[in-house]
Amino acid sequence: MIWLILLSVAFVVPFWKLLPEYGISSYWPITAIFPLCTLIMLYIMAFGAERKGGPR
């Protein structure tokens, strides 16, 4: 059970760095501890939001 919590928390850091580049508040990554929210954020980043910084 603890490994699942640690894995979920590990998703917060990448989203915390990436979502502001897509114009999304940096507070939303807190919801990444829930698997469904993580999936929704990935779809928003992939298909909905346009990256402000341009391609890397």
Image (cartoon, rainbow, N blue to C red):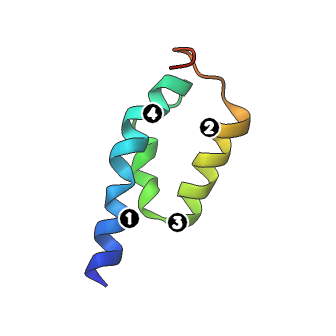
- Determine the secondary structure under disc 1: helix
The quarter of the rendered structure image containing the N terminus is bottom left
Which residue is the site of mark 4?
Answer: 18
Of the two numbered discs 2 and 1 on the same chain, state the one appearing first in sequence: 1
Q: Residue furthest right?
A: 47
Name the spot of residue 53 as percent of width and height, x first.
51, 14
* Tag 4 secondary structure: helix
* Point 55% across, 26% down: residue: 22
| Amino acid carrying mark 3 in the image | Pro
- Cα separation, mark 3 vs mark 4, equals 17 Å
Q: Position of residue 43 (x, y in %)?
A: 67, 46
Q: Residues within 10 Å of mark 3 (few under 14, many from 20)?
A: few
Q: Gap in Å between the C-alphas at discs 1 and 4? A: 16 Å
Say the numbered circle drawn on residue 45.
Answer: 2
- Mark 3 and mark 1 lie on one chain; the one further toward the N terminus is 1
**Mark 3–mark 4 CB contact (< 8 Å):** no
The answer to whether 54 is drawn above or below residue 11 in the figure is above
1 lies above or below 23: below
The image quadrant that residue 18 belongs to is top left
In percent of width and height, residue 52 lies at: 56, 16
Query: For the residue labelled by badge 3, is the local secondary structure a helix, a strand or a loop?
Result: helix
Which image quarter: residue 10? bottom left
Mark 3 highlights which residue? Answer: 35
Element type at mark 2: helix
Give how far apart the Cα atoms at labels 2 and 1 are: 18 Å
Asked whether the residues under the numbered discs 3 and 1 touch, taking CB atoms below 8 Å apart as contact, a structural biologist would say yes
